[in-house]
Amino acid sequence: MFRFITSKPLWVNILVGFLLAVAVFVAIISSLGWFTNHDDAKTVPSVTGKSWLRHSRF
């Protein structure tokens, strides 16, 4: 089962592992905008000078 991996030289396995790690890192970084809804703005009402107890909704 592992003969394919163990038959290669160590430097090949290290190189493949490094390339996979870089690919995963790039995929995560490039998809952060989608995960975090970047550039999606929400309108927040002004609460300056208003009482917290009067406007809290639980």
Image (cartoon, helix red, strand yellow):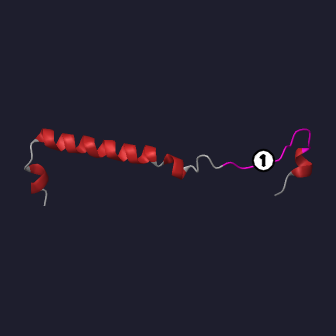
Q: Give the extent of the magenta segment.
A: 41-51
Image quadrant in which the C terminus is located: bottom right
Q: Amino acid at mark 1?
A: Val
Question: Which residue sits at x=82%, y=47%?
Answer: 45
Residue located beneath label 1 in the image: 44
Quarter of the rendering occupied by the N terminus: bottom left
Residue sitting at x 13%, y 56%: 2
Residue depicted at x 53% and y 52%: 35
Residue at the far bottom in the pictured view: 1
**Residue 47 colored magenta?**
yes
Which residue is at the front of the view, 7 or 27?
Answer: 27
Is disc 1 surrounded by few (<14), some (14 to 19) or many (20+) residues within 10 Å?
A: few
Label 1: state its secondary structure: loop
Q: Position of residue 14 (x, y in %)?
A: 19, 40
Q: Is residue 21 left or right of residue 33?
A: left
Image quadrant where residue 15 sits:
top left
Q: Residue at x 50, y 47 (%)?
A: 32
| Nearer to me, 20 or 37 | 37
Q: Position of residue 49 (x, y in %)?
A: 92, 38
